[in-house]
Image (spheres, rainbow, N blue to C red):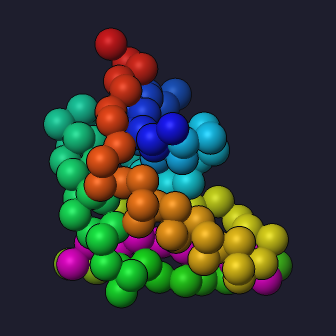
Amino acid sequence: MAGKFEISKRSNGDYQFNLKAGNGQVILTSEGYGDKDGCTNGIDSVRKHAQDDANFERKSAKDGSPYFNLKASNGQIIGKSEMYSGDAARDNGIRSVMENAPSASVADTTA
């Protein structure tokens, strides 16, 4: 089953997207966007930048939990991952974004 982007609305009215793997697990979450066009542009940016491992910033939270950010060529964070149990799990999450993002469908739950 292929991955998909889901566009939703936050409680403050901003739009956001989640990239879900084929199993339905969220593998990347966007920032908030003031309008839907900005959100769909963010999805296009993920598709473009997820192709290159160099765009993934591997990080650790204060408690040591690994996570990653996907950055655009201008250095702006386009999406963040969940916290992972270890480095190998985080790296699997990055691979999943790289594999799913380019051909993922888009589901708009705000319509």
* Residue 66 drawn in magenta: yes
Residue 48 position in % (x across, y down): 22, 63
- Front-lying residue, 22 or 66: 22
**Left or right relative to 41: residue 107:** right
Of all residues, the one furthest to the top in this rendering is: 111
Viewer-nearest residue: 40 or 92:
92
Q: Kindly report the secondary structure that dominates the magenta region of the rendered protein.
A: strand
Quarter placement of the C terminus: top left
In the image, the segment drawn in magenta is 64-73
Task: Report whether 1 appears left or right of 25.
Answer: left
In this rendering, does residue 91 appear at all?
A: yes
The quadrant where residue 7 appears: top left
- In the figure, is residue 88 to the left or right of 27? right
Q: In this rendering, would 64 be left or right of 77? A: right
x, y percent for residue 71: 34, 73
Quadrant of the rendered structure where residue 76 is? bottom left
Tell me if residue 95 is in the magenta stretch: no
Identify the residue shown where x is 52% and y is 61%.
96
Residue depicted at 24% across the width and 32% down the height? 36
Q: In this view, does 22 lie above or below 54?
A: above
Q: Where is residue 73 in the image (x, y as percent from the top left)?
A: 21, 78
